[in-house]
Image: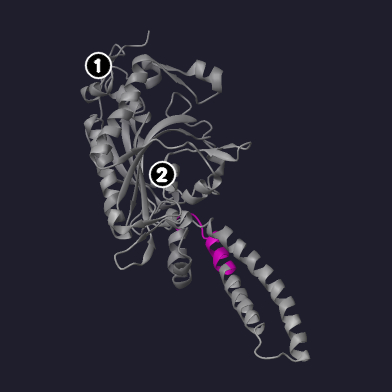
Amino acid sequence: MIDIRLARERPDELRAALARKGGTEAFDALLAADARWRAETSRVDGLRARTKLKGRPTPEQLAELKAVKEELKGAEASLSELERRRDDLLYLVPNPPFPEVPDGLSDEDAEELRRVGEPARFSFTPRDHVDLGGFDLERGAKLSGARFAYRKGPVALTELALYRFALDRVTAEGFEVILPPVLVREEALYGTGFLPNEESQLYRMERDDLYLTGTSEVALAGYHSGEVLSGAELPLRYAGYSTCFRREAGAAGRDTRGVFRVHQFDKVEMFVYCSPESSRDEHERILAIEEALVQSLGLAYRVVVTAAGDLGPSAAKKYDIEAYLPSQGRYREITSCSNTTDFQARRLNVRFRRGDGRLAPVHTLNGTAMTARWLIALMETYQDGRGEVAVPPVLAAFGAPERIPAAS
């Protein structure tokens, strides 16, 4: 959540920043609710002071005391309700974007930073990953419905090798591997900003009052919730591998072919706890790791800065890496990384102790190291005219085959 003290001190600055993210209604409502809460707090404090009498009270003072206590009882109830209302609104206000983030409301407004590598060109019409084979969509739909798939044989082995390859690389960069839970309580989703804003994307297990997570970012952010970390141990870098679940609400008609946009997928996610002073450097570091992974696989890609209005509630800045898909003739997102500043840490109450003993919220960052979208880009990039796929040799050490045979 945002810093309420900052909102009081610099409301115009925050309002202008939030307007770039799509609206200021929640922020203005928050300021009004906070003003009412502060006024009621002052009233309650005054009434409490009047209940403290010195010496032996007179009958008149006792009568006045009784009246004051009745008024105080009502004022405290009002204060409690005003505090609840203020806190509810605080959860609705997103993290303001950094000044350098481009304006706009969609992915078309993203700012391209660079392109790396030459897109694959063929003397034949390139096939997409579905025609190249290894994905049983029909049986996936029979079992679970639309946007589910079986991955089979060499394709399945190649996908598993990609995850192991990513874990190996991020471990070498100082990330500690964690296999986290995928079912979490509501508090973890509020803490990371996925609730209440993105509830439509979540699978809820109502009988158990738990949610399936759409990313291990949720579990990694909640790992240190309610804790005070030592400044000397920062940054803490974790890499989570898990299966993820998303409803893809609002995605009707988008990427319905194949496994680019599905309800269940696996992912390697990087997550960092750091000091506020180092979070921008950590963001660039995560991006550099992601780029090195793409380059190791020889994929053509571009890096873009997401537009302010296309950012999620928690992110102040986000980079996307988009790989070139020959079958579509365009770049598509395969990974992203976000700086969420102290937004999640305030919600989850994760603080660190500075050298002078003062406590402050940490900054948190996240970045995707691997998903099956990389497999799509790999298969389409390294196909030949017969429909076979040459798997990059770097994956052989992690169990991938040399080639994925053409679909029969």
Tell me the residue at 65%/64% (across/down).
Answer: 81
* Mark 1 secondary-structure assignment: loop
Question: Magenta segment range?
Answer: 20-33
Label of residue 402 in the image:
1
Task: Measure the C-alpha gap from mark 2 to mark 1.
Answer: 34 Å
Q: Position of residue 350 (x, y in %)?
A: 42, 55
Q: Is residue 83 above or below residue 70?
A: above
- Is 353 situated left or right of 261 in this image? left
Residue nearest the viewer, comparing 84 with 264: 84
Q: Amino acid at mark 1?
A: Glu
Residue nearest the viewer, comparing 311 with 209: 209
Residue nearest the viewer, comparing 230 with 105: 230
Q: Is residue 226 above or below residue 15?
A: above
Q: Counting other residues with Cα less than 10 Å from the Cα at mark 1, is it few (<14), some (14-19), or many (20 or more)? A: some
Label of residue 93 in the image:
none
Residue 23 within the segment the image draws in magenta: yes
Residue, disc 2: 220
Q: Amino acid at mark 2?
A: Leu
Q: Is residue 372 above or below residue 303?
A: above
Q: Does label 2 or label 1 sit earlier along the sequence? A: 2
Q: Is residue 369 visible?
A: yes
The residue furthest front is 56
